[in-house]
Image (spheres, helix red, strand yellow):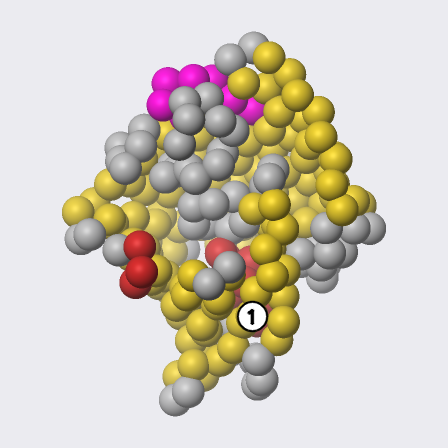
Amino acid sequence: MRKGCPLRVMSALLLGLGLFVPSDARMSERGTLAIYFREAKIGYEEYVWTEDAEGYELSVTGRMSGPMTLEIERLRLRMDRDFIARTFFFKGTVNGVPQEIESTLREGAVTNRIKVAGQVMDSTASVRRDALLLPNPIFSPYLVVAKKFGCGLQAPAEIAAYIIPQVEVAGRVEPKAGSPCALVLTLGGVEIALAADEEGRLTSLLIPGQGIRVAVEETF
């Protein structure tokens, strides 16, 4: 990855500076994810999931030491009641370079403002209206997959994921045979195994082809 490129292949995680919780929101879940690369612990994420009358919000902080250095001071993803992304905000550093991304999604259109080392770039793109927003490879946003499909998925479903702020990728999610709360997600040829509990909380994530494993250390 070229130094300064915004959130492209982010081996991402987050700087623990406190999580924002809107005053009118109800905290429904809080947890810590441990991230492993080839079985060596390389980072963590702390997240808060809240909901209110308008929808849901995911706030994340954390840090990762490799394969590249990345710190996130704040990540915030706002969704409506159908889990459709509406706004996204990221602030942190990638290999020591300060970056910010602010995105708004409305009816299949996304507008991005990207700040890298003090320079501002604006972009727009068309995306599928219900595309999942997955800033690769930050892992807490996969909570959305677990909550949206969870233990209730009966048949494979075609999906799309917007790897913010660059590209939309076609994908597929399907239930794993014999495991009612396990899902197999395929995005751009990459297979991701997720498991959830009966309340739709993410319990594990595995990307075998990349040697990545995410373990839930605690949830409350």
Q: Main secondary structure of the magenta part?
A: strand
Q: Which residues are magenta?
A: 94-100
User: Which residue is drawn at the image coordinates 52% and 77% (left, top)?
Assistant: 174
Which x, y percent locates residue 29? 49, 54
Q: Residue furthest left?
A: 40
User: Which residue is drawn at the image coordinates 46% and 21% (left, top)?
Assistant: 4
Callout 1: helix, strand or loop? strand
On-image quarter of the N terminus: top left
Indicate left or right for 29 with 69 as reference. right
Q: Residues within 10 Å of mark 1 (few under 14, many from 20)?
A: some
- The answer to whether residue 123 is visible is yes
- Which quarter of the picture shows residue 11? top left
User: Which residue is drawn at the image coordinates 60% and 39% (left, top)?
Assistant: 166
Inspect the magenta stretch and tell me whether residue 213 lies in it: no
Q: Number of numbered discs present?
A: 1
Q: Amino acid at mark 1?
A: Arg
- Which quarter of the picture shows residue 204? bottom left
Q: Residue furthest top?
A: 118
Which residue was labeled with disc 1?
Answer: 172
- The answer to whether residue 24 is visible is no
On-image quarter of the C terminus: bottom left
Q: Nearer the viewer, residue 56 or 137?
A: 137
Which x, y percent locates residue 149? 57, 71
Which x, y percent locates residue 13? 38, 37
Q: Nearer the viewer, residue 119 or 140?
A: 119
Vertical position of residue 12 compared to residue 193: above or below: above
User: Which residue is drawn at the image coordinates 37% and 29% (left, top)?
Assistant: 70
Which x, y percent locates residue 15? 38, 29
